[in-house]
Structure formats: structure tokens, C-alpha cells
Amino acid sequence: MKLSARNKLKGIVTAVEEGLITAKVKIDLGNGNEIVSIISKDAIEDLNLKVNDVAYAVIKATEVLVGIPGDCKDEDDKGQS
């Protein structure tokens, strides 16, 4: 598999939960890390994706948000203690 995306995370499929049109796929990345993706049921069929298969989570995003632990206040609480 060759892709231009640089964020490829290899793991093991732990669950495939099919809905009417889409499916939720859970991939265990190891070390207690898991990623979940919603893909079409057609994609599940095309990939023949099953629990215990090796799969890659390929992340292609135009924006990444960063957060830190700590207190989160609503915007309405600004400046109030």
C-alpha cells in the first residue's frame, strides 16, 4: 500500500459494528490506544474487513487541534472566578 498520507497507524481490528449505511470500525493500536472510524458498509465489503484483521488507520486532515489537561470553562465564564 502506497499513500501520500504520512499518518498511517497499524493495528488490529477489534470491532466492526454495522449500521444501515455505515459501519464503525475500531482498531487497537497497541499500548492501550484505540482509534475508531466510520466508513461505508460498501468499504467494509470491498476490504473484506473482519475482527482480528491487520488494518491501517490513515489520517488525512487539513487541521489538527491541540488541547492540554486542566479546567475547561464555558465561554460565558470568562473572567469570572
Image (cartoon, rainbow, N blue to C red):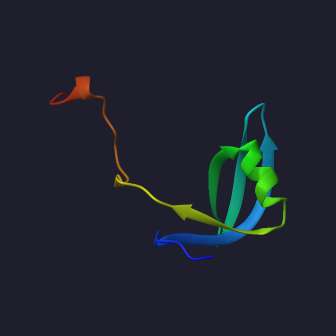
Q: Position of residue 9 (x, y in %)?
A: 58, 70
Which quadrant of the view contains residue 51?
A: bottom right
Q: In the displayed structure, does residue 16 sit left or right of residue 28?
A: right
Q: Position of residue 38 (x, y in %)?
A: 64, 45
Q: In the displayed structure, does residue 39 sit left or right of residue 48?
A: left
Q: Position of residue 16 (x, y in %)?
A: 79, 50
**Residue occupying the far bottom of the picture:** 2
Which quadrant of the view contains residue 31?
A: bottom right
Which quadrant of the view contains residue 20?
A: top right
Q: Compare residues 21 and 16 and report the one nearer the observer.
A: 21
Q: Is residue 50 above or below residue 30?
A: above
State the residue at coordinates (83%, 59%).
48
State the residue at coordinates (34%, 55%).
66
Q: Compare residues 17 and 33 and report the one nearer the observer.
A: 17
Q: How many marks?
A: 0
State the residue at coordinates (46%, 59%).
60
Q: Is residue 19 above or below residue 5?
A: above
**Residue occupying the far top of the picture:** 76
Quadrant position of the C terminus in the picture: top left
Q: Is residue 46 above or below residue 72?
A: below
Quadrant position of the N terminus in the picture: bottom right
Q: Compare residues 18 and 32 and report the one nearer the observer.
A: 18
Q: Position of residue 71 (x, y in %)?
A: 34, 43
Q: Compare residues 15 and 61 and report the one nearer the observer.
A: 61
Q: Is residue 65 above or below residue 30?
A: above
